[in-house]
Amino acid sequence: MKKYIIWILGLLLIAETVAIVCSAAGIFSANHKSAECLAQSESIGAINESLAAENERLSEINNNLINEKESLAVSLSEASEQILSEKEYIKEVNERLLEKEEEYIVPDSKKEYRSEYPDMYASERLVREGSGKMAYLTFDDGPSELTPKVLDVLDKYGIKATFFVTYKENSDLQKYYKEIVERGHTIAVHTASHEYEDIYKSIDAYLEDFYKMYDCIYEQTGVRCSLFRFPGGSHTGYRYGDDMPLIIEEMERRGFNYYDWNVSTGDGGSWVTAADILSRVKQQSEGRDRLVVLMHDSASKTATLEALPQVIEQLKEDGYDFN
Ligand code: ZN
């Protein structure tokens, strides 16, 4: 019996020990789990923080986008308004142009000037159209004391030019009209008086001045001109009267061709040197295949005469033909 009790007590002791060990293990495991939980909760906290920061950044971007959108909407509406007002302006200008055009349409029955100067027609359509790089030298406002010297330079290089001449009372100068023609150059009408206020004030005034020069050239040389140049170029007349479109229409109806220029030597100015003239020709001829070079033929244009050989040589070097 006693032996049994000892056994039982022994068993109880073992059970207790096992219970204690188990309980200790439980505590240990619980402690371990709680550390893990702490670590996890810390990392969740960090994630939450970074999410909050990201959220803040996104909301900032969102605010910026909203602001951007608002400012774009403002500029878009401003641009639309501007386009609308530009459209309005263009419409207005077009309307004004139409009104002007209507003013300029003169019925044929009112064009009495067409029957004036019945012998004033172009003899032929004299359009000098070369191919490749061409340079047409033109001299305005002559003849002058300088004309024979200009002709000498041109002869030396075998170049033919066009002389847009004006009316000269002086018989010493009058003889040069013929010399220009005899030496193979083209003579053409510039104007008799060269007075912008007079010639452009009406179509009748223009035709009267033109006829005086046309007739003078015919008397002096036997040539009926086909070419002409408006004093100041074809746009100048618009400043002096409303008849410019009619003048152009009438001159073309009579078969005349007018020429402006695309290279201006600037030799009209009083302080221009030969070097200035050459540099302007170089500058303005760049990239052009067809040059109409404006020069002047008058007693004071010694710089033009001096520059002429250099201008010719430069243009030759750049590959231009003249005739
Ligand atoms: Zn002129």
Image: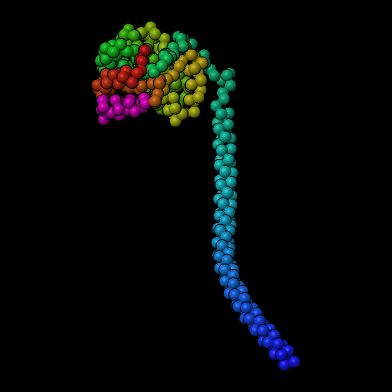
Specify whether residue 190 is in view. no
Figure coloring: rainbow
Q: Nearer the viewer, residue 77 or 23?
A: 23
Give percent across and percent down for residue 131.
42, 15
Specify whether residue 205 is in view. yes
Picture layout, residue 239 above or below residue 321? below
The residue drawn where x is 52% and y is 14% is 115
Give percent across and percent down for residue 203.
48, 22
Q: Which image quadrant for residue 54?
A: bottom right
Residue that extends furthest to the bottom in the rendered view of this protein: 2
Give percent across and percent down for residue 225.
41, 12
Q: How many marks?
A: 0
The residue drawn where x is 41% and y is 14% is 130
Give percent across and percent down for residue 98.
58, 31
Picture layout, residue 170 above or below residue 56? above
Magenta residues, as a range? 263-286
Q: Which image quadrant for residue 158?
A: top left
Magenta-drawn stretch contains 87: no
The residue drawn where x is 24% and y is 21% is 306
Magenta-drawn stretch contains 278: yes
Picture layout, residue 74 above or below residue 120? below
Q: Quadrant of the C terminus?
A: top left
Left or right of 67 in this view: 240: left
